[in-house]
Amino acid sequence: MKIYKFGGTSLGNPERMHKVVKIITGDDAPKVVVLSAISGTTDTLYEITTHHKTGNSPLCRKLLDDLENFFADYIKNLYSSTSSKEKASNYLIDWMNDIRKLTESSYSIDSENEVVSKGELISTWLFHLLLEEKEINGSLLAALEFMTLDENKEPEIEHIQTILIKVIQENVLQEKIIFVTQGFICRNYIGEIDNLGRGGSDYTASLIGAGIGAEEIQIWTDIDGIHNNDPREVVNTRPISRLTFNEAAELAYFGAKILHPSTILPARQHDIPVKLKSTLNPEAEGTLITRAKRDTPCVVKAIAAKDGIIAIKIRSSRMLMAYGFLRKVFEIFEKYKTPIDMITTSEVAVSLTIDNPEHLNDLVAELEYFGETEVDDAQSIICIVGNRIIEENGVIYRIFNALQEIPVRMISYGGSKNNISVLVSSPDKKQALNALHDRLFIRDTQYEMSKN
Ligand code: ADP
Ligand code: ASP
Ligand code: MG
């Protein structure tokens, strides 16, 4: 069994949804098809909940009307038969009624989560009806019945596995081999509707893959694989054909928007290859992510950046020659369930970064007990990833050389063999990404070519 996940842009218009059908029916192998919401839907639903929260009913109503018009138009152009169009229009009426009801009663985080879950519910429903219209034997599985989180917001893999395997076996007996389900949405430990965070459908796909022991997880998107730099910030990026799980995990975690940060973890744990493919250009090779081979040479493969980073520096004379200082600092972060990304220490100061500002004030208040605490927000971590790059001669020199014009706030080197990270102020990010790209990928390639 393979998992096929299609992102919002892959479903962006009716023509693309037809393309997706073509891709998944290219062979007769059984597959699970995970869909996100059609592009723009989740953004609009979040906007609606924001206005719901602040009590801005006219804007809320306007967005709801726009959403209804968008889907009415989509439905008109998606199906060929009048009966499918009618069925879908009736679904749309109920769907809109549900959202309107939710946004007319009082706001709560539960109502917000329920509203934003609607995007995946409609995209999968419309897609399943399209399969039906084309007489393709598909089955629609409700993610809210199997995708669950525990008290720590961690997916319950065993529960997912038990339910899914049972449902799939029942369906296979009825000769159904295409299973369509929603990405992103799930239930929390008390059974309320929740989600896996923005871009979470990738994570759904790998959780399902791990749960059912899939042969491969394919992530289909609007670009031909993971590129060696962020194509939104840098021109001349190119797709990388092979990455290891560790490299891909670092890239996803440190900002490559193409993958949700947690996607690689279940795949790596169950040793399931992950393939990135382009819906717009299915012939392109894409990126294959697998376990590392022993003999892979040292090479810099990609650069990514993560925004919204907060740097915290604690300067304390008490740190001088003291042991147990870092443990006490870490305990504060543990208390507020705030993960630390980068860390550097000197004899009298420790600098670290976080990306979750939720408990910043409490953290700073407690850290001040240890010493003077400085906070800088609007920082970006730039992460240079590759196979054993810290063993490659001259990489650090090329990085410093590229960044000579850009103030660097922190450097992390040696924490992982596959990753060197630097912290820069966010307004300098674009320049840093471009300078590193030029130095690590363009100039040296030209030099190597000129030698041959
Ligand atoms: P989907 O809707 O399919 O989930 P996303 O928008 O989440 O797609 O991810 C695809 C986008 O990620 C691309 O269009 C590209 O702009 C962006 N992106 C950022 N970094 C990279 C990278 N290193 N390689 C490829 N795409 C990237
Ligand atoms: N629809 C959700 C979002 O926009 C999940 C996803 O796209 O993967 O964040
Ligand atoms: Mg995405």
Image (cartoon, rainbow, N blue to C red):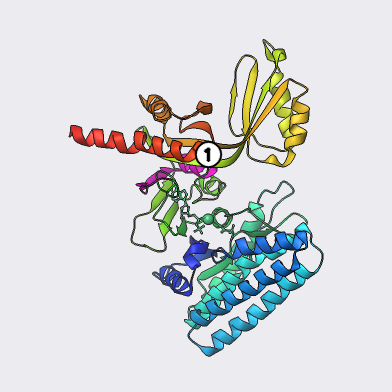
Q: Residue at x 74, y 30 (%)?
A: 364
Q: Magenta region: which residues?
A: 234-255
Residue linked to disc 1: 427
304 vs 66, left or right, is left
The extreme bottom residue here reads: 82
Q: Quadrant of residue 190?
A: bottom right
Q: Residue at x 41, y 68 (%)?
A: 23
x and y percentages locating residue 289 in the rendered image: 43, 47
Q: Nearer the viewer, residue 65 or 387?
A: 65
The extreme left residue here reads: 452
Q: Quadrant of residue 434?
A: top left
Q: Quadrant of residue 166?
A: bottom right
Residue 140 visible, this orientation = no
Q: Mark 1: which amino acid? A: Pro
Classify mark 1: helix, strand or loop: helix
Q: Where 312 falls versus 198 (above or below)?
A: above
Q: Nearer the viewer, residue 170 or 350?
A: 350
Magenta stretch encompasses residue 162 = no
387 vs 78, left or right, is left
294 vs 32, left or right, is left
Q: Residue at x 67, y 11 (%)?
A: 320
Residue 363 visible, this orientation = yes
The extreme top residue here reads: 321
Q: Where 399 falls versus 64 (above or below)?
A: above
Q: Nearer the viewer, residue 406 or 173?
A: 406
Crowding at mark 1 (Cα within 10 Å: few <14, some 14-19, many 20+):
few
Magenta stretch encompasses residue 254 = yes
Q: Where 336 falls versus 18 (above or below)?
A: above
x and y percentages locating residue 208 in the rendered image: 57, 57
x and y percentages locating residue 370 in the rendered image: 75, 20
